Image (cartoon, rainbow, N blue to C red):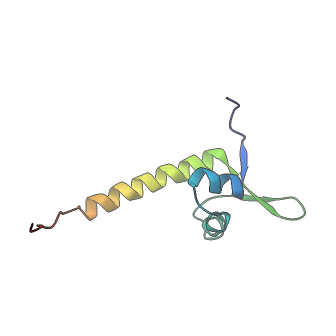
Amino acid sequence: MPPTPRFLTLADVAEVLNTSSAQVYALVRRGELPAIKIGGRGQWRVESDKLEEYIEKMYVEARRFVADHPFVESDVSD
């Protein structure tokens, strides 16, 4: 398996996260996902390590949400 490239396009990130490029662009523009702009056309690139940090941060936030909002099954009458 080839090594992961250091930098990913927004389309690459969208594929990893199983979302749209527009959603990834919004994450970048809001500052939630660190990225750099390169080249004369200003193409965005996300460093692989930053993407992994973002994913880990989302797991932490999800665990916090679950802890703060426990799932309670309602009584179901048959």
13 relative position to 9: left or right: left
Q: Residue furthest top?
A: 1
Of residues 78 and 69, the one nearer the viewer is 78
Of residues 43 and 50, the one nearer the viewer is 43
Residue at 33%, 58% in the rendered image: 64
Q: Residue furthest right?
A: 40
59 relative position to 71: left or right: right
Q: Is residue 42 above or below residue 7?
A: below
Of residues 53 and 62, the one nearer the viewer is 62
48 relative position to 71: left or right: right
Task: Count numbered badges in the picture.
Answer: 0
User: Where does the N terminus fall, quadrant-wise?
Assistant: top right
Of residues 8 and 11, the one nearer the viewer is 11
Residue at 62%, 45% in the rendered image: 49
Residue at 51%, 51% in the rendered image: 55
Image coords of residue 72 (percent x, y): 18, 63
State the image quarter where residue 26 is shown.
bottom right
Image coords of residue 15 (percent x, y): 63, 53
Residue at 26%, 65% in the rendered image: 69
User: Where does the C terminus fall, quadrant-wise?
Assistant: bottom left
Image coords of residue 75 (percent x, y): 11, 67
Image coords of residue 47 (percent x, y): 68, 49
